[in-house]
Image: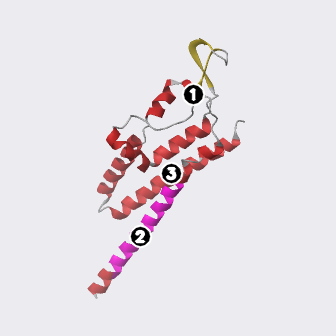
């Protein structure tokens, strides 16, 4: 059946990821003037978040700080650390390795080298990923969600206070 703990961890991460984006959508909905502007803002913010995560492209040095603002960065990094280990193998054409003929360690894959250059360190060849290391991305994602909940509360509180002040002025 596979690793049940890893499947539960990935499910939790994806759920928290979705809750973060739903929270961002709620904030946009509260702050936007109309539906059209809200849809535009949601599209721009979600696409920018995915681009900043380093999944598709390497950001310039001046913008590398932006990945820390992206919930996608934390989710993607944590899911990769949960699912893959440096000792996992794939079929390659390098000949014979210590794993067997035409088998290479995943930590030596060019895909993971590309992610490493983009700031997403999945595995380091010869070093085991500890269970604590998997949660290094989970904690900031949880904090991100909690901060968004506080922002939602403050936005709604300010909006209702503004509405109460307007209703008093109309009387």
Residue topped by disc 2: 154
Q: Residue at x 70, y 42 (%)?
A: 4
Dominant SS type (magenta): helix
Residue topped by disc 3: 18
Q: Is residue 77 left or right of residue 43?
A: right
In this rendering, the label closer to the viewer, 1 or 3: 1
3 or 2: tag closer to the N-terminus: 3
Q: Percent position (x, y) of residue 46?
A: 39, 47
Quarter in which the N terminus is drawn: top right
Mark 1 vs 3: CB contact within 8 A: no
Mark 1 vs 2: CB contact within 8 A: no
Magenta part of the chain: 141-164
Mark linked to residue 107: 1
Q: Is residue 155 magenta-colored?
A: yes
Secondary structure under the numbered disc 2 in the rendered image: helix
Q: CA distance from mark 1 to mark 3?
A: 29 Å
């Amino acid at each position: 059946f596979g690793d049940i703990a890893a499947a539960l961890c990935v499910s939790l991460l994806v759920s928290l990821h979705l809750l973060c984006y739903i929270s961002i959508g709620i904030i946009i909905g509260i702050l936007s003037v109309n539906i059209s502007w809200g849809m535009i803002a949601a599209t721009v913010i979600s696409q920018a978040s995915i681009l900043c995560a380093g999944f598709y492209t390497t950001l310039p040095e001046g913008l590398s700080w932006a990945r820390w603002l992206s919930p996608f960065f934390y989710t993607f990094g944590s899911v990769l650390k949960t699912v893959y280990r440096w000792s996992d193998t794939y079929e390659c054409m390098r000949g014979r390795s210590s794993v067997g003929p035409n088998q290479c360690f995943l930590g030596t894959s060019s895909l993971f080298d590309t992610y490493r250059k983009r700031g997403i360190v999945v595995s380091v060849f010869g070093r085991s990923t500890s269970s604590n290391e998997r949660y290094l991305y989970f904690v900031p994602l949880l904090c991100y969600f909690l901060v968004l909940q506080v922002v939602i509360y403050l936005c709604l509180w300010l909006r209702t206070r503004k509405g109460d002040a307007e209703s008093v002025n109309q009387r």
